[in-house]
Amino acid sequence: MKSTAWISTCIVASLVLLAENKSLGQSLIAGIPSADVAKRGHIEFTHESQWASQNSKLKWNSFNFFTYGIANRTELAVSLVNVGSPGTGNVAAGIGYKTIVPLRKGEDVGTFRERKLSVGQMVYAAVGPEKNTNRDRVGGWIYSHVSTRLWPSRTRLTGGLSYGSSHVFGFRTTNLIGLNGLVEPMQQRVPLSPFTFIGGIEQPITKHVGLLADWISGRHDIAALITGVQFTIAHQVLILAYKRANDRVNDTDALVTEVMIHF
């Protein structure tokens, strides 16, 4: 998708009228967007770090989000992604939104509860020292998923689709087998699979502890299965997880830490 398309989509989204509705319980999930939004008038800061070993060296990458609830079921977001060490040459800043549409009206009873549709998008711009001039300066991420909570186990199931650019999915060097069996690096300008499936499961154990797993399909930097434990203490949420990359050749597994603070 061209830069002008991302910008046009952002302008159209800003004109959407925001309806009021009762907000539901907040949760956090590691790799995919949560099925919840920040409460109206509240700010949330989320930081995710991924720690991996690559060529016997520590590789660190991070994703950072500030969200503000502008309505009972809509939030605005600004983010700074792919801030890492060693430098990835892919640092990007973004702005966007996420909104929730309840799929059931009236009394919420039965096996499938809290049924809702989540729609969101982020528009990203490359920032910082840009080492590779072939990358588009503007890109983004569009996603949508549906979720429901099973009763009485309170298990939340989430599934949907997304489309994104290299700004969030990764702009990297892939290894190809060239002549004489030698490994040759190749610059990847766009994600190998920008159209992806996203899915997740969250299982509360106690009021403060829960298990989670989420998956993003494809072959790119965030295409992976992440499994972990979530701890909720007062206004803070902490996740400790493990990331298993889909592409076992060009990507590495990682330890994931994520923290969210409500204000």
Image (spheres, helix red, strand yellow):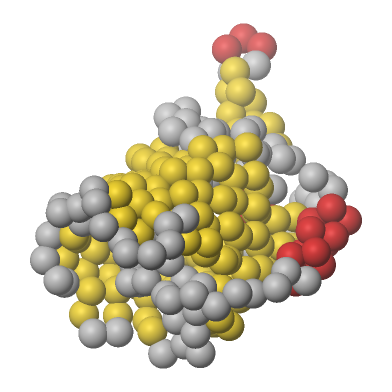
Residue at far front of view: 106
Please report the residue visible at 79 percent of the width from the left and 49 percent of the height from the top. Answer: 135
* Near-viewer residue (108 or 23): 108
Where is residue 210? Give x, y as percent.
19, 60
Residue 195 located left or right of residue 128: left
Please report the residue visible at 80 percent of the width from the left and 64 percent of the height from the top. Answer: 12
* Near-viewer residue (56 or 140): 140
Where is residue 87? Give x, y as percent.
59, 60
Residue 47 located left or right of residue 69: left
Residue 20 located left or right of residue 212: right
Q: Is residue 202 above or below residue 187?
A: below
* Near-viewer residue (263 or 183): 263
**Does any portion of residue 45 appear in the rendered image?**
no
Please report the residue visible at 58 percent of the width from the left and 83 percent of the height from the top. Answer: 70
Please report the residue visible at 66 percent of the width from the left and 68 percent of the height from the top. Answer: 96
Residue 36: name its quadrant. bottom left
Where is residue 43? Give x, y as percent.
48, 85
Residue 175 located left or right of residue 13: left
**Does any portion of residue 39 appear in the rendered image?**
yes
In the rendered image, the quadrant that contains the C terminus is bottom left
Q: Is residue 186 above or below residue 53?
A: above
Q: Is residue 227 above or below residue 62?
A: above
Residue at far right of view: 4
In the rendered image, the quadrant that contains the N terminus is top right
Where is residue 99? Give x, y as percent.
56, 66
Residue at far top of view: 180
